[in-house]
Image (cartoon, rainbow, N blue to C red):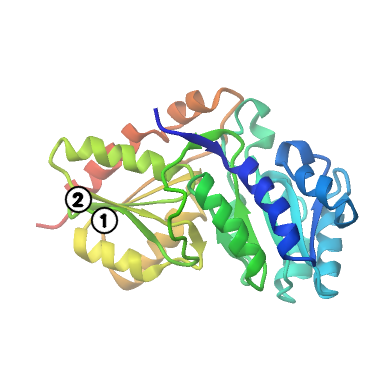
Amino acid sequence: MADTASTREVAGQTLAELGAEFPDLVVLGGDLNVSTFAFLFGEKYPDRFFDFGPAEQNIVSVAAGMASSGKIPVVSTFAVFSTSRPHDQLRVGVSQPRLNVKVIATHSGIITGEDGVSAHSIEDLALMCALPEFTVVVPADGPEAVRAVRSAVATQGPFYVRLSRAATPVVHAQDYDFRLGEAETMREGDDAAIVACGIMVGVALEAAETLAAEGISCRVLNMATVKPLDERAVVVAARETGAIVTAEEHYVVGGLGSMVAQTLAREAPTPQETVALHGYAESGPPDALMAKYHLTAADVAQAARRAVARKAG
């Protein structure tokens, strides 16, 4: 069984470590500090930690004020609360003035599980990718979450980092080289390319193994930086394989699949199949939800077969 790690936990640990390296780093929580592991930062730096309770609009507004005063503020809460409720504050208060605010959000997607549909964040990528100045990063696993958080804190400008609740398979070595803004080739292949982000990277790798046994060679790209999208990697994969599959734990509109489709339509028209959510889910165990809403390796493999079948010639 593969090692697993919770990206929310390693992100909290990383923030606590970064406090010593960045004296201007402050963390603003929203009454969920134990769940997000932001409390670890608060224990080490109580004078740089602020809990606002469930008042997300205020959190973002104060973060904007702190950023304009030279601090590096991190907004820490669940993905559904950090993107939907304060979207106007993110738009006017952070994105338009290009302030150095980092939204590091946990409990994204549907593997928040038993918390129920109101806590499932399936629109957050669409919302945050629509804000012009934000960089949007979706780590695939624990080691990548460490590097994503470090990069967000060290890089000037607004960031959205999307993390999960549950422990998920680790697909990277601890010493791998994370490059912000660049797709990572996790597996080579010539017949199709699966472009995935977040927890779907591990799912895509499992699907590629299944397809290899059938004689279908699948490239797997980890598109951890969803915005700005590594368009060159998408175009190269399209031209070299002739078939594209996108896989994301997000609504089918406005996320990774939409951004890849826009790139393909403009630069390299190619058959594309999407594995994504087509509506809201329900309360339930993460694995059961992934199966019911067609986000499994079997679903990705079937999408790849469809894409390959659509190739010209």
Q: Which residue is found at the position 56% from the left and 50% from the top?
A: 145
Which residue is situated farthest in the left direction here? Answer: 313
Q: Which residue is found at the position 62% from the left and 70% from the top?
A: 155
Q: Is residue 254 visible?
A: yes
Q: Earlier in the sequence, mark 2 or mark 1?
A: 1
Which mark, by number, is residue 310?
2
Q: Pointer 1: what residue?
A: 271
Residue 226 picture location, percent across and down: 49, 60
For the residue labelled by badge 1, is the local secondary structure a helix, a strand or a loop? loop
Residue 81, above or below 115: below
Give the distance between the C-alpha atoms of the residues marked 2 and 1, in whole angstroms. Answer: 6 Å
Residue 99 in the figure: left or right of residue 57: left
Which quarter of the picture shows residue 2? top left
For the residue labelled by badge 2, is the local secondary structure a helix, a strand or a loop? loop
Q: Locate the C terminus and report the quarter of the image it occupies.
A: bottom left
The disc labelled 2 sits on which kind of residue?
Arg
Residue 61 picture location, percent across and down: 84, 62
Q: Which residue is found at the position 20% from the left and 59% from the top?
A: 242
Foreground residue among 44 and 38: 44
The disc labelled 1 sits on which kind of residue?
Pro
Residue 93, above or below 226: below
| Disc 2 and disc 1 in contact, CB within 8 angstroms | yes
Residue 307 picture location, percent across and down: 24, 48
